[in-house]
């Protein structure tokens, strides 16, 4: 993976944190003006700082716990552990911790804030369905996310999206209960702006999250082909995942974009495709089978 992608993802993580923070503080300012209470700004700032710290240092643990992932050791599944270990060495990465989710739906994801703190998680369904080459293709895909710091960028986007949704919900609850007073035209205008922002903010944040997710999947597919020198392995794995058609409704919806394939039922309408967490599997398979080294 070229260092330009790594540096870009590190830089984008910082930019996203700044933009999300600025946006939430802007919402807090508008509500403070509407309510004539500047303490709202201080409260919002405190919430943002705390959530940013939790996201950065504990976000991966929250994601693993919310998806029911359990850590394993080499003795628990030597074949899986050796696959991760060997591919990590080939990719020039420290061996990430390995987790398994006891679910029949075939899927996998990686998370963490850096290669040194990274984890790779697979479902029991994936282990039961894939042969050696297919499993290698999936693991190589996840290691690509680790190597180019997709894991940090995506983890922060997930957690920051949660902050935006939380703050928007709080502002809406306050705003919709407020009663306007005669002569308070400025406050009414601020209130209307704040309510509109609170409604639109989660939608804009979600679109941003999905755009990042779809782009990184294509890139990780290509890196998997380069690492294994066998694009057919991942192509076959993706086809098996699609054919299995086993949704994973227990998965955390907030982290659905982390998985190698959408853990929920694929939707077909154009509107739902626009909000899809992943590019179509058929398109990914076609790119892999036409991959040129």
Image: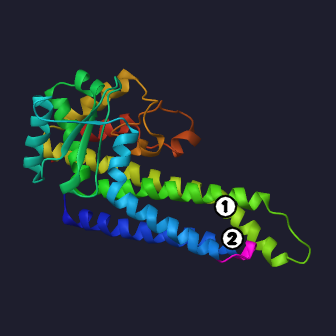
Q: Is residue 192 visible?
A: yes
Badge 1 vs badge 2, beta-carbon distance below 8 Å: yes
Comparing 274 with 59, the one in front is 59
Identify the residue under disc 2: 31
Residue at image location 11% in from the left, 43% down from the top: 87
Residue 171 location in percent, x, y? 67, 61
Q: Mark 1: give few (<14), some (14-19) or many (20+) Cα within 10 Å.
A: many
Comparing 287 with 245, the one in front is 245
Q: Is residue 20 visible?
A: no
Comparing 89 with 33, the one in front is 33
Q: Is residue 206 left or right of residue 7?
A: right
| Quadrant into which the N terminus falls | bottom left
Quadrant of residue 148 within the rendered picture? bottom left
Query: Magenta region: which residues?
Result: 33-38
Residue at image location 27% in from the left, 26% down from the top: 124
Residue at image location 90% in from the left, 78% down from the top: 183
Precedes in sequence: disc 1 or disc 2? 2
Identify the residue under disc 1: 171
Q: Mark 2: give few (<14), some (14-19) or many (20+) Cα within 10 Å.
A: many
Say what secondary structure mark 1 lies in: helix
Residue 36 is covered by the magenta coloring: yes
């Amino acid at each position: 993976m070229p260092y330009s992608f790594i540096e870009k993802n590190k830089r984008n993580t910082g930019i996203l944190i700044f933009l999300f923070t600025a946006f939430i503080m802007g919402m807090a300012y508008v509500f403070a003006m509407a309510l004539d209470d500047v303490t709202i700004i201080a409260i919002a700032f405190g919430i943002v700082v705390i959530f940013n710290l939790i996201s950065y240092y504990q976000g991966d643990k929250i994601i693993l716990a919310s998806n029911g992932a359990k850590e394993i050791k080499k003795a628990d599944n030597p074949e899986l552990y050796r696959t991760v270990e060997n591919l990590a060495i080939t990719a020039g990465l420290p061996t990430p911790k390995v987790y398994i989710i006891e679910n029949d739906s075939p899927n996998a994801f990686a998370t963490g804030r850096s290669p040194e703190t990274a984890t790779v998680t697979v479902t029991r369904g994936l282990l039961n369905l894939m042969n050696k080459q297919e499993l290698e293709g999936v693991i190589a895909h996840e290691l690509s996310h680790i190597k180019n710091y997709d894991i940090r960028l995506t983890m922060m986007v997930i957690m920051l999206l949660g902050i935006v949704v939380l703050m928007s919900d709080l502002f809406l609850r306050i705003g919709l209960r407020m009663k306007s007073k005669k002569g308070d035209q400025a406050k009414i205008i601020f209130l209307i702006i704040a309510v509109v922002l609170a409604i639109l903010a989660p939608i804009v944040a979600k679109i941003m999250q999905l755009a990042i997710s779809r782009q990184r999947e294509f890139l990780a597919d290509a890196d998997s082909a380069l690492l294994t020198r066998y694009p057919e392995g991942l192509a076959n794995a993706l086809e098996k995942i699609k054919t299995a058609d086993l949704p994973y409704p227990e998965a955390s919806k907030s982290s659905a974009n982390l998985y190698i394939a959408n853990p929920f039922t694929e939707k077909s309408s154009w509107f739902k495709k626009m909000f899809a967490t992943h590019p179509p599997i058929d398109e990914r398979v076609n790119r892999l089978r036409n991959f040129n080294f």
